[in-house]
Image: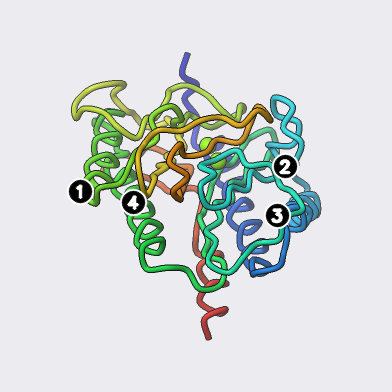
Amino acid sequence: MIQYKSSEEIELIRESSLLVGKTLAEVAKHIRPGVTTLELDKIAEEFINDHQAYPAFKGYGGFPNSLCISPNEVVVHGIPNNTPLKDGDVLSVDCGVLKNGFYGDSAYTFEVGEVSEEKKALLRVTKECLLKGIEQAVAGLRIGDIAYAVQEHAEKHGYGIVKELVGHGVGKQLHEKPEVPNYGKRGTGLKMTEGLVIAIEPMINLGKAAIWQDNDGWTIRTKDAKVSAHFEHTVAIKKGKADVLSSFKEIEEVLNNKKD
Ligand code: MG
Ligand code: MG
C-alpha cells in the first residue's frame, strides 16, 4: 500500500532530506586522496547525531555503518573500510537520516583528486538523468514517465542502466512503495498524485548494465569492473513541478570552494 503524505509530513521529510544534504556537504569537505571511507563514515555519523537525528542505514538489515560508500566499480551499498582513496577515484556516497519519525534519502557521486574526462562525463550525465527524471515527477504523469526519461538520457550516451536496484517511496519507512525503476515505458505504472514522496536514484554504468553482489551480502559491483555513478534526491509530487526535498546546494558550494 502506498502511504500518501500530508503537507505537514512532507515538511518533516524535507527537514530530514535537507539534513542529508548538509551531511553530504560535510563529508565532501574531507574527500581527498589518502582519506579512508571509514573516516568519512565517522564524520557523517557524528554530524547526524549532532543534529538530533539518527543515521538511517546503520543497522538497516544489519548494515554496519552510517553511509553507503561505493568507489569506482562499486555501484551502491559499499561498506566503509580502511582503504585510502586514490587520485582519480569516483566515490558514490549515499546517506539517509531519520528525524522526527521521518526519513530523508539522497546520494551524490564525488571526484577524488583529478578524474579522467570519461569519468567526469559519466557523473555529469548521471546527474542529468536524475534531473530529467525529476522533470517527469509531477501529478498526472506516471512512474514509467520518470523511468523512461532516465533510461532515454543514459542510453543516448551509451551507458549501462542498473535494473536490479530502483528508487522507492520515502516516509515513515526508508523504503516504501512504489518502486521507481530507472528504465521503462512512458505512460505506464502508477499515476502520481500530490502526497506521493519518492526517491529517484539513477545508477548508471560507464560500461555494461550487468552487476553482481559481493559475498559480504551488500556490495554491488559492475560485472565488467568499469565505474558506476549514482545520484539521488527525495522529491514530493506536486502539480506542474516536483518539490525537491533534498538538496545538492551545500555539497556543490563545498566542491566549488575546493576548486578555488
Ligand atoms: Mg539513498
Ligand atoms: Mg534510496
Q: Nearer the viewer, residue 194 or 173?
A: 173
How much space separates mark 4 and mark 3, taking CA atoms?
27 Å
- Which amino acid, by three-letter code, is at mark 2? Pro
- Which callout, 2 or 4, points at the residue further toward the start of the chain? 2
- Quote the CA–CA distance across marks 1 and 3: 33 Å
> For residue 202, which quarter of the picture?
top left
Residue with the most extreme front position: 224
In what element is the residue under mark 2? Answer: strand
Residue that carries the numbered disc 1 in the rendered image: 156
Which numbered disc flags the more N-terminal residue, 2 or 1? 2
> Is the residue under label 3 in contact with that under label 4 (CB below 8 Å)?
no
- Tell me whether circle 2 and circle 4 mark residues in contact (CB < 8 Å): no
Give x and y (percent) for residue 134: 34, 45
Q: Earlier in the sequence, mark 1 or mark 3?
A: 3
Residue at image coords 61%, 57%: 24
Mark drawn on residue 55: 2
Q: CA distance from mark 3 to mark 2?
A: 16 Å
Disc 1 is placed on an element classified as helix
Task: Name which residue type carries label 4.
Answer: Leu
Q: Is residue 101 above or below residue 71?
A: above
Classify mark 3: helix, strand or loop: helix
Q: Earlier in the sequence, mark 3 or mark 2?
A: 3
Tell me how far mark 2 sits from mark 4, CA to CA: 26 Å
Q: Quadrant of ligand 1?
A: top right
Label drawn at residue 244: none
Place of residue 77 in the rendered image (x, y in percent of width and height, measured from the top left): 60, 38
87 or 163: nearer the viewer: 87
Mark 4 lies on residue: 131
